[in-house]
Image (tube, coloured by chain):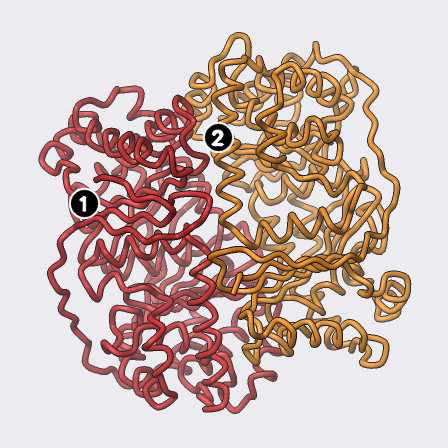
Amino acid sequence: MPSAQKSNARVFNMTERTDIYKLANGMTILGIPMQQVQSAAFDFLLPAGAALMPDNSCGAPAVIEDWLFRGAGGKTSRELTDLLDGLGIHRGGSVESKHIALSAVLEAENLSLAIELYADIILKPALDEPQFEYSRQLALHGLAGLEDDPMHKTLLLLRQHFYPDPLGRSPVGKEEDLQNLTAQMSKHIISENFNVARIIFAVAGKYDFQKLCSLLEKLFAGQKPKKAKDIKAKAQSLAYHHLQHEGAQVHIGLMTPTVTPQNADYYNVRAAVAVLSGGMSSRLFTEVREKRGLCYAVGASYHSLKEMAGIGCYAGTTPDKAQQTYDVIIAEFKKLAEAIGQEELQRAKIGLESGLIMQSESTIARAQTAATDFYMLGRVRTLDEIKQQIEKTTVKSVLDFLKKNPFNKFCSVTIGPEKIKT
Amino acid sequence: MSLWLRERMKFKHKKLSNGLDIIAEVNKDAQSAAFGFFVKTGSRDETDEISGVSHFLEHMLFKGTDRLSAHDANRRFDDLGAQYNAHTTEENTVFYSATLPAQLYEAAKLWCQLMRPAIRDDDFNMEKNVILEEIAMYKDVPEFDVRESCRSLHFGSHPCGKSILGSVESIKALSGRQMREYFSNRYAPNNITAAVAGNFDFEKVCDCLQVGCADWQPKQVDRFTDYFAGTAKKEHQKKKNLTCRYLCLAGPTVSYQDKRVYAAALLAKIIGDDTGSRFFWRLVDPAIAETAAMYCEAMDGIGVYYTLIRTPEENSSKVMQIVEDIFNSLQKEKISADELQKAKNKVLSAITIKNEIPMGRLIELGVNWTYLKEYRPIEDEIQRIKKVTLDDLMTLLQEFPFTPFTQFSLGPEK
């Protein structure tokens, strides 16, 4: 029966608990109870992300994510949408490297009904062929829309060039593949990839875990596990890529490799990134925007897959300032290993810790973090554990890490009217 | 639901002698506390000469005071672990932060200092570059560009049509002296509301503000609020390097102060929510448009229904035929009770979710007070939504039909 990991949190004004239950077929159920709320949020991670697609089917997960909602469990597309809307559900869906993530947030009293509908969507989608064509067209429109969104396109291209193929594949796909994708191919992908043993379900907010597990058992236990798929990533060298675009700005993206969350140095990296780009007194904001007025938008953040991680940075600037912006950013990345002030690190740590607690007030953020943690680490970290690990970092530990792992290799992407020299 | 809310949310209000309203909603269960200053000023309060000054001034508040440099201000917020920012609209400039409860008072004191900025010329000139970069950035975001152009076309010479960012020319020509003058005319305590939400001690916040805002001098502050239904003009602009067609429509509706604002918001959801709406079934579900959304923007004395659509260029005529058909057929294809109920459910659950987080509640609280000078408990909000009837929607539609409307579109050159 459901088990619970308890930690009587020292620093937080609450008793933290993570509920965990595994169905016999391997499906994982996670719960983060939050007694102070009336809502509940859940997140299904389905193992059918962009990197898991056959080589000729880039973009299939985006089509599938839409197609699943076009009728399920004997209900038509309209009946299903009416039922979901009737429950006041706020839906979210995204395609990640390894997963299609389906999330929802709603008033807690409607949680069971919502989960029943989602079980139909995942296990009994109608997969009606005329409806497939609409989903495919929408994915093609999404791909065309990306051409008009150079900032977003920069970030997707950056991941594509930074992570070895197929890990960094774009969630929106390729035009040629989307043109050739058929309903049959997509059905095959669903049957191959929707492996219940690898599905992670996480809920956060107000719920009854016992009741929830019984419901999920009833809905999902009949599914048999499948053999897990392995992927082989190709070697990738970090280089500079430019796309000509006659827009107002040059959109600059760069990314340098670092350790994944499984690594003992993970919290040193998070502290380093916070010194670089935490609050508005951090180095990038101060040097690029405040002192030089080069950009409106500039910032760095940590991004990780299970196999590999990087620190990514974005800046958008007018063409005559692009080279200087790039040079200042690179200099700040490299300078980080030279020295970090005691107060500077303390400020970065406070920002990380208070951000953690504030994020914990959101049911959807808690559910998504729990699901991602379990996928990455095989367990869910408590807020208390994360806070303690952040507190443990010191100027010495961060600098030691940076000296052992210097930021000297960058993948860079620019989209705009001018190239830069790297 | 209502009992739960009533037990947790406690409203407090105090008015300082200089006219500054302090409003607060205490929730002792919250893990954080949010603080904000809501200044009733925005682009509609500008003249053409100083177009963009409200937004530029919002940036300059972060540049420090006579005793605090910009870097000191940023560092002090970061020392508090604050998540802080600001935004400017046509009619409001809002400064806000969220912190852990214990840090709220220091954050409030810091905001009080920043609200009397130095506006130093060298900071002003450096920040001008950042504003020009922000203008350039939004030129590469067609959804923003089309909405700005549509608003300007819809309002014509009415002040609500003024650009929030200003133009490259108006920003380049703007002087520190003009900004200081605008500041002294608009940032009077009687034109500002201080709002607090989450877990904190009200008396302690009041003490901070009493000291921090004591020397702010009240001043007569006016705004032009004549009603205007819009020009109903239509324009199209071609832009190189665009792939899709972007359509923005604007039509008149009720103001924030009008009691029918809830009916207007529900009507916009029925027509243009991102799932299950009439736009969804006729445009997005059959993949004619990629996105199609309608929302109601209720403003000070005026209101607008905005429709935003992204579609492949070749579908744009078809899209407009369908949109006009949806608008024109509302009299015969009446809204059903089921449509209204679904819209209510979506709005009600959004209220629950948003208000669980102090920062979400803060914005609601501050904006309500700015427009209405009254506190509206979440429970009242819920009741007002629940009470909207089909008759209310039809009466509203008779007074504010969706046609005629202003239309601006942006599309590729070829």
* Quadrant placement of the N terminus of chain B: bottom right
Dot 2 alpha-carbon crowd within 10 angstroms: few under 14, some 14 to 19, many 20 or more: many
Splitting the image into 4 quarters, where does residue B74 fall? top left
Q: Name the residue that disc number 2 marks.
A: B130
Q: For the residue marked with disc 2, what is the amino acid?
A: Val
Dot 1 alpha-carbon crowd within 10 angstroms: few under 14, some 14 to 19, many 20 or more: many
Image spot of residue B24 (x, y percent): 68, 33
Q: Nearer the viewer, mark 2 or mark 1?
A: 2
Above or below: residue A79 compared with residue A334: below
In the rendered picture, chain A carries what hue? red
Q: Can residue A201 be seen in the rendering of this structure?
A: no
> Circle 1 marks a residue in which chain?
A
Q: On the rendered structure, is B193 left or right of A387?
A: right
Residue nearest the observer in this picture, A242 or A232: A242
Image spot of residue A105 (x, y percent): 52, 62
In the rendered picture, chain B carries what hue? orange
- State the mark number for residue A258: 1
Above or below: residue B374 compared with residue B305: above
Q: Residue at x 20, y 50 (%)?
A: A260
> Circle 2 marks a residue in which chain?
B
Mark 1 falls on what kind of element?
strand
Q: Are marks 2 and 1 on the same chain?
A: no
Q: CA distance from mark 2 to mark 1?
A: 31 Å
Q: Residue at x 24, y 78 (%)?
A: A54
Q: For the residue marked with disc 1, what is the amino acid?
A: Thr
